[in-house]
Amino acid sequence: MGINKVILVGNVGRDTELRSLPSGTSLAKFSLATTEPRFKDQNGEPHTEWHNIVAWGKLAEFCSQYVTKGRQLYIEGRIRTRSYEKDGQKKYFTEVHADTIELLGRRDESGGGTPGAVAGFPDDNDDVPF
């Protein structure tokens, strides 16, 4: 048995890119920055980690409407690592596949929307086959 669960709270680094797959499923991608103030870099600045976030279906559509650069989010999801080959070398990258996204902060922050609005699985996706 294993558990693959990630919880992140951070700020969106770039606006959501929304695509529709040939099957009709929506796919959204954006980056999220998490900053750890107690860990400093060589210049004394807080350490910031960047995460690639992926959302599917209705959650992706939610992201395209409300997730914009600078918006603070709470995300629950799973880590996925993929690989590809470039110039004869195998490259790896890690993504967080979001299951739940909650908007944090005030209404007038960048991105607008409703504070506390939540989108995710399984509550708002009755058509998900699992």
Image: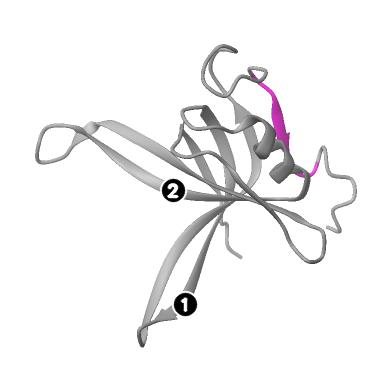
Q: In this view, which residue lies farthest toward the bottom?
A: 88
Q: Secondary structure at mark 2?
A: strand
Who is closer to the viewer here, 108 or 95? 108
Residue type, label 2: His
Residue 83 part of the magenta-drawn span: no
Q: Earlier in the sequence, mark 2 or mark 1?
A: 2
Q: In this view, which residue lies farthest toward the right?
A: 127
Q: Residues within 10 Å of mark 1 (few under 14, many from 20)?
A: few
Position of 32 with respect to 128 (left or right) is: left
Question: Where does residue 12 sit, x and y in percent of width and height?
Answer: 48, 35
Q: Is residue 8 above or below residue 81?
A: above
Part of the protein shown in magenta = 116-122
Residue type, label 1: Tyr
Point out which mark residue 22 bears: none
Q: Gap in Å between the C-alphas at discs 2 and 1?
A: 18 Å
Q: Residues within 10 Å of mark 2 (few under 14, many from 20)?
A: some
The residue under label 1 is 84
The residue under label 2 is 51
Question: Where does residue 24 sit, x and y in percent of width and height?
Answer: 82, 59
Question: Where does residue 127 sit, x and y in percent of width and height?
Answer: 90, 50
